[in-house]
Image: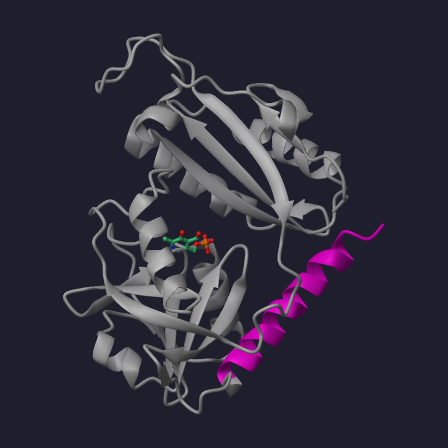
Amino acid sequence: MRDGPATCYLDGALMALEAARISPLDRGFLFGDGVYELVPCYAGAPFRLEAHLRRLRHSLAATRIPDPLDGDGWARVLDQVCEANGGGDQALYIQVTRGCPPKRTHEFPARSEPTVFVMSSRLPPAGSYADGVTATTREDPRWSRCDIKATALLPNVLLRQEAVDEGAHEAILHRDGELTEGAASTVFLVRDGKLATPELHSGLLPGVTREVVLELAAEHGLPYRTRPITLAELYHADEVWLSSSTKEVIPVVELDGTPVGGGTPGPAYRAMRDWFAQLRRQIARGRQP
Ligand SMILES: Cc1ncc(COP(=O)(O)O)c(C=O)c1O
């Protein structure tokens, strides 16, 4: 990724990020009435693009915002933004809002064009969190449609900040003692050599990295199950991991002030980290001429 002025995409045109302007009447600004995606790019190519676009279409359909581009259109825009920012490894952020009608009303405007914005940022260098992070637990106060990747993220922002205020990296959430996810991550545990993560339901986001982790587990013979997980189980896990598109998989070595397992990244994590790195190398090789 190139240093220097970043290039973004706004409503059909590439431009310098500093030059991009959105009206204060945009419903994304007024209501958080929009959805987003975060697509990692490895070696200049979007990773798991189809899965991210499928989730974007789901979020758009669930919020009744018309999809402004078809699959090829999205791929073209992401390629343009990635290339304009120097290729390599990047995080591409997509946001689509219900647009910018002349009046603020709660109900949908009769007519408005979605606002489409794409920007790029750096991915943390591989291995940035390999020594492990700390996490705290919190009751999950969010609405019941967390399967929608909505830009209205105030609960997630507050939960993450509470965790940071306590010196932790992430807030791990539960509803009545049943694990949902992190403020911005999927949660996994390992117990007796078996991997587990909560089943998908509307109370959590279907993580794209979650799918990659489960595929790698299947491919390399690490037994796994998707099932309800209690907070009590999490406290007795040998390993706890977080996953997300920007941070891949990271080990939690301390939960609510108590060491997880031996208090250092465990063997299953180290294996998963290596399988992920191998996958990235394969992708990079596949892109070489
Ligand atoms: C609430 C929440 N859950 C899970 C995830 C992980 O999803 P993905 O692996 O698709 O990035 C994220 C990512 O930002 C998130 O915000």
Image location (x, y in percent) of residue 119: 59, 36
Residue range corresponding to the magenta coloring = 268-289
In terms of image quarters, where does ligand 1 lie? bottom left
Please determine whether, in this image, residue 68 is positioned above or below residue 35. above
Q: Is residue 147 visible?
A: no
Outermost residue to the front: 165
Q: How far across and down, in percent of the image, does residue 141 sit?
A: 20, 54
- Could one spot residue 71 in this view of the protein? yes
Whether residue 161 is situated above or below residue 258 in the rendered picture:
above
The quarter holding residue 99 reads top left
Q: Residue furthest left?
A: 176
Q: Main secondary structure of the magenta part?
A: helix
Q: Which picture quadrant has residue 148?
A: top left
Q: Which of these two is toward me, 26 or 143?
A: 26
Q: Residue at point 45% right, 60% down?
A: 211
Asked if residue 184 is among those painted magenta in the image, a careful observer would answer no
Residue at 40% over, 20% down: 26
| Left-right relation of 45 to 101 | right
- Which residue corresponds to the image point at 47% horizontal and 33% vertical from the top-left? 95
Question: Between residues 15 and 46, which one lies in front from this camera angle?
Answer: 15
Please name the residue shown 38% across and 63% down the image.
Answer: 165
Query: Where's residue 125, x and y in %?
Result: 66, 62
The image quarter in which residue 237 lies: bottom left
Where is residue 69? Give x, y as percent.
51, 24
Q: Tell me: residue 259, above or below residue 198.
A: below
